[in-house]
């Protein structure tokens, strides 16, 4: 089973709203990732969690706040977003952070109005 | 500064023939390379990977070649099938940077029956 699930599939939010994206994997992976993908562009790394600790933050604005409640779950809390934050948000997981392939979820399509 | 480049935005191939997708990189600190396939409205699907100590890796119809001196890798798909039509991303992981992946811009492959 190489499934990473993400909820919701679609999200529309206003600039003053607070919302959360959720990601779950049951493969026993110890590394989890958030990526952002704009239309016709490649995925761009936002955050890496390794063994439930934040190990990489790619200078992401503080209006994006990641959280890893346990080894299977990864959340991305959103607050005061801008319209340019509209994108596909992808979660991924891997066995570790070395020579391991990352498995991606289907993504959450976020629209900020 | 694009560290991973896929210079062909699109490629069209006849069913049954070979598809060759190319990728160039500039950072000599990359030590792990991966290929992903992406359908619209889905997350990237892992295809095949290669570490920098190898020059070839095969998995079924997919073979990845790495030429370190040229900083070039390629994905060969033989024989190509209509179901292979998708966007293909190459990705590279820098040494000792905790699972970070840097993606190329993608190549859209169309396999015609």
Image (cartoon, rainbow, N blue to C red):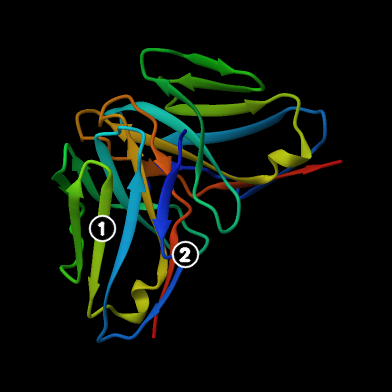
Disc 2 is placed on an element classified as loop
Quick check: A73 above or below B50?
below
Residue B97 picture quarter: top left
Q: What percent of the width, then of the height, locates residue A72?
A: 27, 43
- Label number found at residue A9: 2
Residue drawn at x 17%, y 51% as measured from the top left: A69
Residue drawn at x 47%, y 58% as measured from the top left: A41
Cα separation, mark 2 vs mark 1, equals 14 Å
Quick check: A82 above or below A96?
below
The crowding category of the residue bearing disc 2, from other C-alpha atoms within 10 Å (few below 14, some 14 to 19, many at least 20), is some
Mark 2 and mark 1 lie on one chain; the one further toward the N terminus is: 2
Quick check: B39 above or below B68?
below
Disc 1 is placed on an element classified as strand
Badge 1 is on which residue?
Answer: A75
Chain under numbered label 1: A
Residue drawn at x 35%, y 38% as measured from the top left: A26
Q: Is residue B49 left or right of residue B110?
A: left
Give the farthest residue toward the right.
Answer: B113
Residue A99 picture quarter: top left
């Amino acid at each position: 089973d190489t499934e990473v699930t993400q909820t919701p599939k679609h999200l529309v939010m206003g600039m003053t709203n607070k919302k959360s994206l959720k990601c779950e994997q049951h493969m026993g992976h110890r590394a989890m990732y958030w990526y952002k993908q704009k239309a016709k562009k490649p995925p761009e790394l936002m955050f890496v969690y390794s063994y439930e600790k934040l190990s990489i933050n790619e200078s992401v604005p503080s209006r994006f706040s990641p959280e890893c409640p346990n080894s299977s779950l990864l959340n991305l809390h959103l607050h005061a977003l801008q319209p340019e934050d509209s994108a596909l948000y992808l979660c991924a997981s891997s066995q570790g952070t070395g020579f391991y392939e990352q498995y991606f979820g289907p993504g959450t399509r976020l629209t900020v109005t | 500064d694009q560290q991973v480049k896929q210079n062909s935005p699109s490629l069209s191939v006849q069913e049954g023939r070979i598809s060759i997708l190319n990728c160039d990189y500039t950072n000599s600190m990359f030590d792990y390379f991966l290929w992903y396939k992406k359908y619209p409205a889905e997350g990237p699907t892992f295809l095949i990977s290669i570490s920098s100590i190898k020059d070839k890796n095969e998995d079924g119809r997919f073979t990845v070649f790495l030429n370190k001196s040229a900083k070039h890798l390629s994905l060969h798909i033989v024989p190509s099938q209509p179901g292979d039509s998708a966007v293909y991303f190459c990705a590279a992981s820098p040494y000792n940077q905790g699972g970070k992946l840097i993606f190329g811009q993608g190549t859209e492959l169309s396999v015609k029956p």
